[in-house]
Amino acid sequence: MPLSVLSVASEAVPLVKTGGLADVAGALPGALAQQGIAVTTLLPGFPSVMAAVKRGKVLHSYDSLLGEPARLIAGKLGDAALIVLDAPGFFARGGSPYADPGGKDWADNWRRFAAFGRAAADLAGGLVKGRRFDLVHAHDWQAAMALAYLRFAPLAGSTPVPSVMTIHNMAFQGYFGAEIFSGLGLPRAAWSIDGVESYGGVGFLKAGMESASVITTVSPTYAREVREAEFGMGLEGLIQSRGERVRGIVNGIDTGEWNPASDPHIAQTFTVRTLAKKAANKRALEAEFGLEPGDGPLFVVVTRLTWQKGMDVLLEVLDHLAGIGGRLALLGSGDPAIVEGLHAAAVRHPGRIAVRIGYDEALSHRMQAGGDAILVPSRFEPCGLTQLYGLAYACVPIVARTGGLADTVIDANLAALNAGVATGVQFTGVSYGALTGAIDRAIRLYHTPGAWQMLQRNGMKADFSWNNSGAAYAALYRELTGTQ
């Protein structure tokens, strides 16, 4: 009988997505199926998710799950098993999964995702006859309370199971005031420094980290970085205390969805052997963004417009980029001040800088296919996926040397160029000088015969599919369950 894993996440493509977590949770079941591991994904019943289980079987009904009636409904996530927590009082709302249409976090997020964790712990404890699980894998703070409930308030008569807590971004911790503790349904023993208490309040991510058998981050470098105050966000001491129980596994990408040889969203498909065909995508992207056509490099940015992503520094370098012959197409949303600055730059440099505010999945594919290079100047980046998409689409990544960016891009220094292994440009420290230096270096490489094509081809040949990542997770699951 294959190992059975309950994956608990608030998002999974193609049903609900606000960021990279959804890509990971959506791809993991297929990757692990190849390793002989059966994954069932538990998702909250957001409207888009409920639409996928209209004819699903009701597995269990709660009269009151932390104050609201709820049901567990079976469905499918691709070829894998899916269970949805149908709790209209918690999840049948407009706006994003976490905030109202005005962008303000829902005041009862603590109760919504505590209920989600409670349901996950019940499932893992054998609530539904015939549904057994050997391990629970929780993703980010929204799922973290599952592990606290398993530890402090397991379903009566259940057998303990090992667990994994994956941190996709330490900056988002699910921190709430101490007054919510009484509403969680946990015993008094859970209110402790090694339980759910965190700096005088309740920390959902912290609770999951304390309760997990193993903590993982989404890259080895990030696993090292979060041991330090700069990246640990107040939880670096906990990370240090867990020692070797903190691991780093790089995310993969869905090579079925992100494949320039078969991508239906792009103007011209291409492969590493037909790289010259990529030029048609560049011309199409220039036209779509209203940029001046030209032979100089076309930079792209696809990101959240935030301080974390280094967008304030990007604003500072745009005049330099345009002045030395570069052009930029940007897609993103976020900080209003950054949005205003980007629009102002586009006005200053018509035909050289163009901006689209919002998010468009198909457009992001066209940008990777049409761009010469993608800028990723993040101050911290647990893994990052845009640079992986860039590698796959011969859109050379220019990245800050941090987290998963450092793990997945090989800098085009002299040694790497001579060895023929470079895939992009790295820089240290997110500052005007560092970013302009990286852009200047990229433009020199772009105009060096053979060098740029080598970077592109090396990137396209790199394997960042879920094959390696899936094997790493499978090995971890087997280690924790004592199976082969």
Image (cartoon, helix red, strand yellow):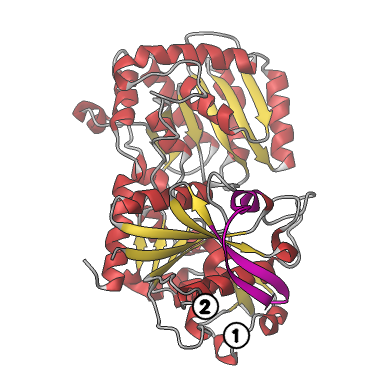
Q: What element carries label 1?
A: loop
Residue 148: image tag: 2
- Tell whether 174 sits left or right of 216: right
Asked if residue 314 is positioned above or below residue 195 in the image, the reply reads above
Q: Of the residues under marks 2 and 1, which one precedes in the sequence?
A: 2
Residue type at numbered disc 2: Ala
Local crowd size for mark 2, using a 10 Å CA cut-off: few (<14), some (14–19), many (≥20):
many
Magenta span includes 60:
yes
- Tell whether 146 sits left or right of 248: right
Asked if residue 372 is positioned above or below residue 406 in the image, the reply reads above
Residue type at numbered disc 1: Leu
- Is residue 137 visible in the rendered image? The answer is yes
Residue placed at 35% from the left, 42% from the top? 408
Task: Give 383 or 251, whichever is nearer the viewer.
Answer: 251
Residue placed at 30% from the left, 50% from the top? 34
Q: Which quadrant would residue 452 be assigned to in this image?
A: top left
Marks 2 and 1: CB-CB under 8 Å? yes
Residue placed at 45% from the left, 30% from the top? 437
**Residue 312, position as x, y percentages in the image:** 62, 39
Q: Which quadrant would residue 85 be assigned to in this image?
A: bottom right
Residue 87: image tag: none
Pointer 1 residue: 186
The span picked out in magenta is 48-74
Local crowd size for mark 1, using a 10 Å CA cut-off: few (<14), some (14–19), many (≥20):
some
Q: What element carries label 2?
A: helix
Quarter of the picture containing the C terminus is bottom left
Task: Give 193 or 213, whichever is nearer the viewer.
Answer: 213
Measure the alpha-carbon separation of dots 2 and 1.
9 Å
Quarter of the picture containing the N terminus is bottom left
